[in-house]
Amino acid sequence: MGDDNGVNGDLNANLRYQSTGDPQLDKAVDQWLTWDKNRRTRAQVEALVAAGRREDLRTRLCSRMSFGTAGLRAPMGAGFNRINDLTVIQSTQGLYSYLSRYFPEFSSRGVVVGFDTRGQEESGCSSQRLAKLAAAVMLSRDVPVHLFSTFVPTPYVPYAVKKLGAAAGVMITASHNPKEDNGYKVYWCNGAQISSPHDKGILQSIEEQLEPWSASCWEEDLVERCSLRTDPLTQINSCYMDELTSLCFHRDLNRSCPLKFVHSSFHGVGHAFVQQAFHAFGFAPPIPVPEQKDPDPNFSSVRCPNPEEGESVLELSLLLAERENACIVLATDPDADRLAVAEKCGWKVFTGNELAALLGWWMFFNWKEAHPDPADTQKVYMLATTVSSKILQAFARIEGFHYEETLPGFKWIGNRIHELSKTGNSVIFAFEESIGFLCGSMVPEKDGVSSAAVVAEMAAYLHNKQLSLNQQLYGHHVSKTSYVICNDPPTIQKIFSRIRNFDGDASYPKTCGGVRIVHIRDVTTGYDSSRPDRRSVLPVTRSSQMITFTLQNGVVATLRTSGTEPKIKYYTEYCAAPGNRSAEVLKKTLILYRSFHFNINRAGRYGPKVISRYI
């Protein structure tokens, strides 16, 4: 059936189901049922039609997904704005169309495709199946596909893209999102996640390629019989583990390390890969949490598959560590690109900012041992997202290396690493506060596998010096990060509009808790009061909300929307000069500002009380 789907005639006369009473919605339903070949997702739409659930149908069928900070991400199930067989085929057709126009040699370079362990029985949408369908679309157009034969950590896909010289990579994953979600993450030929203008160009190409090209696109088993498909698993895993040893600085010490480590893979991909990484560093393997080491798309033993949630989701790991007398707990999220760490000192779970302070120190300490000439630091960089702690900025001022900030999302860090490498510079550490770390620059993506091995070596080294991780953690930067859930986009819009028009049109708040606000940066609008031209140096991102306030007393506070979940996130940090305040005084002061005073509770009339109560 063509694109008009019978619009030029009487659409209802051709319907194979009862009408919803809304011609536009009927067209969307008919289009879905015409194109979708997955009987389970077809049945979901048919059931919604039969039940007369028009709003549900509109939500699913009358809008499409867009690229956020982590690619396409949405619940699995039927609908054009969800992750399923049809939307993955459509997305891959659009990706093919864009890449074939951009790369003259696309048909020889090919693409890399990987997947995690997610799946949903009611929609028949497993990550593995979706990855095979993405591969089938490319293979149907004679494009070579390097499809991993089993689940892999997310950083393996960008690593393979660079190692194999592929034009792009696709990873089917929703990382640490709830079990209902899945995603479609795209990497450019430089190994970094796609950013503008490629994300917009690919979305436009998707819109132009909505109807599946042929039956071949639905042939999951095409990957088993097509000679253009290769399995890069053995080669990439071997290269990755070999290259990982470049981050190992104290192998002899590691071999004799008396510390025990516990590792949880949160029912995801990480178990075998972290074990291999420990072996590459000369360690005995970490003790796995037995209830969580094997893949389970339901994440049965945790209320939430995100180790960033802290002690509440690390309970099994901490109990096992107590039984085994282990000092360090390491937890990778389901696709192993993030890492949480806890240490036995009353069990302290480190925040992303705290762990970044330690890892930044560790990477520079070892780099400096190998490069004693101070002049060499002029080519050394550390990167962080702008909502992350400024502790490395203070460290950079002392040691003389460069520190830069990017917008939130590792796609910005990855692309900046690529730009810096072209001018002979080296990024030795990068991070985002949401427990995403990159030690070295072997892959332009956060990497929980390599970070786990590096943390283990750092802990072993400090133990040999009679120090713990917590004892080594120092500085006068105290931070607090959290979020509230808001499923109503209009409410979010009104909250941020209220802030931008606080004392009249285009007037931001002037004080917070009685302290003067000295700078305001709004990357949604491109405004930065600290700049002579009032223009933000960071790229304008009108599709998301983010405002940062700098207070006269050193507190920095940012309010932003998540790019992957229905969350409003807030980040606060108190940066005081060394010797000026004790850590406890800093913490007490920060608590006063954690609520983002601004009288933002006046925005309560715009939305749920939960917003005004916690922001």
Image (spheres, rainbow, N blue to C red):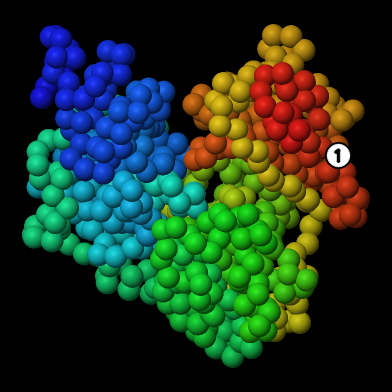
Closer to the camera in the image, 153 or 447: 153
Look at the picture and state if 195 lies above or below 439.
above
**Residue 128 image offset from top left, x and y in percent:** 28, 56
Q: Residue at x 85, y 50 (%)?
A: 587
Say whether residue 55 is visible. Answer: yes
**Is any part of residue 99 visible from this angle?**
no
Left or right for 548, reference 255: right
Measured as percent of width and height from the top left, residue 198 is found at: 34, 34
Residue at the image point whose x is 52% and y is 40% from the top: 565
Residue 266 place in picture, x, y as percent: 50, 64
Residue toward you, 387 or 21 = 21
Where residue 98 appears, as percent x and y from the top left, is: 23, 34
Q: Residue at x 16, y 35 (%)?
A: 212
Q: Where is residue 343, by image quadrant? A: bottom right
Crowding near the residue tagged with mark 1, few <14, some 14–19, many ≥20 C-alpha atoms within 10 Å: few
The residue lying toward the viewer, choosing from 285 and 295, is: 295
Q: Secondary structure at mark 1?
A: helix
Image height check: is 329 above or below 13? Answer: below
Picture quarter with the N terminus: top left
| Residue at the bottom extreme, as displayed | 256
Q: Which residue is mark 1?
A: 592
Type of amino acid under label 1: Leu
Q: Classify residue 289 by image quadrant.
A: bottom right
In the image, taking residue 473 as reference, residue 73 lies left or right, namely left
